[in-house]
Image: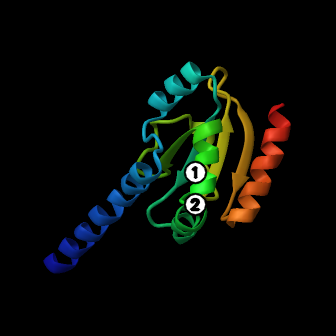
Amino acid sequence: MKIVLLLLSMFLALNGARIDDFADGVGYERDYNTAKAKALELGKPIMLLVVADYCPWCKKFERKTLEDEQINKTLQKDFVPIVIDKAKDKGSYPDEYNASLIPAIYFIDPKTEKKLYEIVAYKSKQEFLEELEVLKGELK
């Protein structure tokens, strides 16, 4: 039994670092208040990515879509991106963005903290770029 608990603990510890590694690799914030302050300073919306370490679709979305150089450049230029773990970071961001389906992305006005746009579920690069075009049209 001790071995099972030890292996489970090691597995959870290794998985917990994945979100931080992803955030570091693409330049996303990990703290909501830091992202909000930065967004207010830069006059950009917040892009809040809600994922979980246990979610295979979240990992696929990160790897196949969000780590794409073109997509990441666009997101960094137009938004202040932040990634949070739905379970581990609960309480450190507004409750209204605790998504029931993940991955979920909320584009938020940093002044009012109101949702401007929402994307839910895995999106391919092309689908995500199309969603961003719709969002940009709505923000004008």
Q: Is residue 5 left or right of residue 134?
A: left
Work out whether residue 98 can be spotted.
no
Q: Quadrant of residue 139?
A: top right
Residue at 62% from the left image edge and 55% from the top image edge: 70
Q: How far across and down, in percent of the image, does residue 44 sit? A: 64, 28
Tell me the element at label 2.
loop
Q: Answer yes or no: do the residues labelled 1 and 2 have beta carbons within 8 Å?
A: yes
Q: How far across and down, in percent of the image, does residue 93 sit? A: 51, 36
Q: Which residue is mark 1?
A: 72
- Mark 2: amino acid: Asp
Image quarter where the C terminus lies is: top right
Q: Which residue is mark 2?
A: 68
Work out whether residue 119 can be spotted.
yes
Q: CA distance from mark 1 to mark 2?
A: 6 Å
Q: Is residue 10 left or right of residue 117?
A: left
Image quarter where the N terminus lies is: bottom left
Residue at 57% from the left image edge and 48% from the top image edge: 49
Q: How far across and down, in percent of the image, does residue 125 sit? A: 68, 64
- Mark 1: amino acid: Asn
Badge 1: few (under 14), some or many (20 or more) residues near its Cα, within 10 Å?
some
Q: Is residue 89 left or right of residue 99?
A: left
